[in-house]
Image (spheres, rainbow, N blue to C red):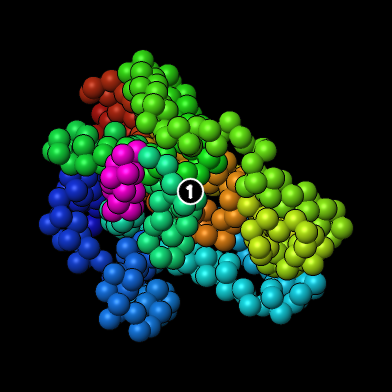
Amino acid sequence: MSNRESNDQHVDSLSSLYTFNPKALWRQFKKEHFAFWMVCLYFVIQYFDPQEIYKRLDFMPWDKVAIGLAFLALPLDPCRRWVRDSTNVWMTLFLVVIYLSSALAIFPAISWQHWFAFLDWYVIYFLIINTVTTPERFFIVLAIFLLANFKMAIFGARTWIKRGFGFVSWGIEGPPGFFQNSADLSTEMLMFAPIAFELAMFVKPYVKRVTYWFLMTGSVAGAMTVLGASSRGAQVTLAGQAGWMAIQRKLRLKIVLAIAAAVLIGWHFLPAAEKARFMRSGTDQTSVQRLDYWRAGVKMIEQHPFLGVGFFNFAPLYALRDPNHLFYGKPQLPHNIFVQVGTDTGLIGLFIFLVLIYRNLKLTSEIRRTCARTRDAPGFAPNVARGLALTTWGFVIAGQFNTVGYYPFLWINLALTVALANIVRQAAAAQAPVRMHRTALDRSPTFAPGTLDPGVTSAHTRASTPP
C-alpha cells in the first residue's frame, strides 16, 4: 500500500471518529490489538472506577491486571513502537533518585511502604507512549478520558446546584480513589475542562450540534465543580486558565467576552462563605498550617539538599520536630508539589521534576509547530496540544496548594503529550520523502517542447549530422 493510500485511509477513519459516533468508535476499537484494548481498560478502571460502583467486581486489582496483560501482549502488537524521547531518560532518572532517597531516608521503612507510588506511573507512562501510536488510538483514548471526566463533572455540578450554589466546608467529594478529596477532584477538573473545550472547538464542523454542546457542557460542568468544591487554589487556577486561553486564541473578542461573562457569572454564584474564605487567605487556620508546612519543608531541604529527607518522610519528620503545630491532630503532606518533591528527593529530584514539567510544555509547542508544516498531521493535534499545555499549567498552579505530585494528573498528561508528539513526528517523517522527491523534480532541468536534453544525442541525430 502506498503512503498516499495509507494517508487517505487515516483521513477517512479519523473523519468518522471526529463525529463521536459510537458505532464508528466501536468499529475502530475492534480493529485494534489486544494490548491497546487493555490500555483502554486501564483508563476505564482508573477514571470510571467500576469496582466501586459494583462491589461484586472488587475482588482483584483490575488496574494492575490490565497493565500486566497489556505488557504481555505488547510484543505481538503490530502498531507497537519504541518511542524515543528525552522525557524517557528524565523519567528513569527520577525513578532512580526516588529509590536512592528511599534507601538513605531518615525513616527508610516508611519510604519503602510507598515504593510503588511513582513506579506505577513510570510503568503506565511507557505503556501508553509505546501503545498509543496512531491517531485513531489516541482519539479513542481521549474519548474515554473525556467521557469518564464528563461523568465526574456532571456529578459535581449537579451536587452544587442541588445545594443552591451554597457552601459546605468539605466541598464536593468525588469517587473513591485519587479523586475523592474535594481539592483532588477540583484538580482533575482542571485537567479535563481545557481539553474538552479545545476538542469541542475542533470537532464543531464534524459533529451534530448536540454533540458539540455535550462537550462544551462538560467543560462548563468541570468549571462549576471547581467553583463548588471549595478549593481556593483550584479556583484561582481556573481563572488563570481562562485568561491564558483567551491569550492563546489571540484575544478574539468573542472568546474574551465569553470568558469574561463566565468569570462574572462564576463569581456571582460563588457562595458568600467561599468569598469570605478568600478574604481570610493567609490568616485562617488552613492557611497558617500550610505556611508552617512550607517553612518546615524548605528547612528540611536546606538541611538535606541532595536527596532530601526521604521518600514520604515529610509527615513523620514534621510530627517529630513540630508536634505543637499540628492543627488537625496528625501530620499531613506539605500541600505543595515542589516542597513535596524537594523533601522527598532533594534538589536533584526537584530539578528532574521541573525538567519533566518543562518537557511537557515544550512538547505541546513542538506539536503545534510541526502540525503547521505537516499536511498529514492529525487535525485534532494542535487543539489537543493547546489543551494539554493548559492542563499542565493547571497542575502546576493548583499544586502550589495541594500535594498531588504522585497522583495521575501530571503523569497521564505527560504520557498523552509524548504519545501525541510521536504521532505528529511520524506524520512529518512520512511527508519528508515526498517533499524531497518533489524538490528533486522541481530542480531537474527543463527544455523547450520538441528539443532534446543536450547531454543525450539520439542515433538519428548522429546519422543525420553532416561530416
From where the camera sits, is residue 227 visible? yes
Q: In this view, does 129 lie above or below 360?
A: below
Q: Which residue is drawn at 36% across and 26% down?
A: 265
Answer left or right for 224 relative to 124: left
Magenta region: which residues? 149-165
Q: Which residue is drawn at 74% across and 49% down?
A: 292
Amino acid marked by disc 1: Ser
From where the camera sits, is residue 308 visible? no
Q: Does the magenta stretch include residue 56?
A: no
Q: Is residue 12 above or below residue 140?
A: above
Answer left or right for 29 relative to 408: left
Nearest the camera: 287 or 54?
287
Q: Residue 196 occupies which quadrant of the picture? A: top left
Q: Which secondary structure is most common in the magenta stretch?
A: helix
Q: Residue at x 28, y 31 (%)?
A: 461
- Given the current orientation, which residue lies at the most extreme bottom position? 59
Q: Residue 250 occupies which quadrant of the picture? A: top left
Q: Residue 280 occupies which quadrant of the picture? A: top right
